[in-house]
Image: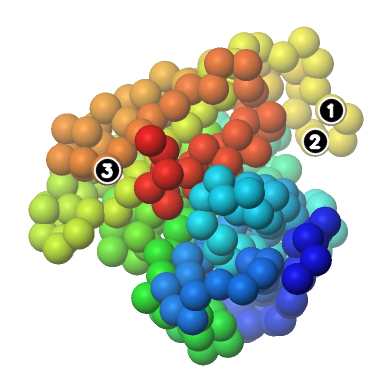
Amino acid sequence: MPFLVRASLEQFALAHPSGGGELTISVAAPSGTGPDAGVPVLYVLDGDMLFGMAAEIGRAVSSVAGFPAHYVVGIGYNAEYSDFLKHRTADLTPPIAAEALADLGGLGAAIGGDQGGGADAFLGFLADRLQPEIAERYPQTVGGEHILFGHSLGGLFAAHALLTRPASFSAFIISSPSLWWDGFSIMERLPAFGERLAALPRQPRIFVDVGAREQELPSSVPDGIGVTLDEAQAQIRNARMVDAAKDFADALTEAGVTAFRHVAFAEDDHVSVAPAALLHGMRFALGRDH
């Protein structure tokens, strides 16, 4: 078989768990001949932005046996960017208190913060609807690892999925998680998580990362996002991205996780860290970190 210079692509639509509209599911199959069963699957949140990157990293690295060939599944909306921001907030976030929403100011309006709170329903869709659909369409994935990747609000969602349904995926790559959402209330779920973890026959592998430069204050903001420079700087101070990721990692260790790695990528910020997280997170999730 000739060497492929780009990842494959298949797409189909599934009904959104809210009952309104559809989700676009993008699938990249591994190149070459693989096993008949047990092929891993990487599920990528924010598929409109991150699926292509994840698929190409998977194709390139697995083609030289850097880690096992795997399917990449992106979950997206096929929407305009302004609508995409609001759709992802609706699906990827737990509920937020009115006071915490007000504290977000222009950022909350830009991302549709008042529409948030659908994380539990979206997690149910991924675990109970999408995973069986992938198994039916691609039977060689049956018995394989199911890995969840989320970045930013997607990282918050991945953290929420881990803490509330730790058996829903075999591994969680929690990249630059927006733990600040709702005043860091996600940290309140850690005591119950310890009990859920102890009851599992097998713990998931957990990779938590952040860009070490994420707490550096910006000197400008992009046009059209509805946030002033002062508001952006205040949000970054309050988000404590690097420190909060470390706090979360420490709390996971205290809860009893065993297959775990926390990384702060020295030269990366909130945007540039995503490809590093995909590469190193998948190496860890697939047990190729040594």
**Residue 116 in sight in this render:** no
Secondary structure under the numbered disc 1 in the rendered image: loop
In the foreground, 16 or 162: 162
Picture quadrant where residue 86 is located: bottom right
Residue type pointed to by label 3 = Ala
Residue 90 percent across, percent down from the top left: 58, 59
Nearer the observer, 42 or 95: 42
Circle nearer the N terminus (3, 2): 2
Give the CA separation, mark 3 to mark 1. 39 Å
Mark 3, residue position? 259
**Left or right side of 158 for 58:** right
Say which quarter of the image contains residue 258: top left
- Confirm whether residue 145 shows in the render: yes
Left/right placement of residue 157 relative to residue 152 reads left
Which one is closest to the eye, mark 1 or mark 2? 1
Residue neighbourhood size for the residue with mark 1, other residues' Cα within 10 Å, grouped as few (<14), some (14–19), many (≥20): few
Q: Position of residue 70 (x, y in %)?
A: 55, 63
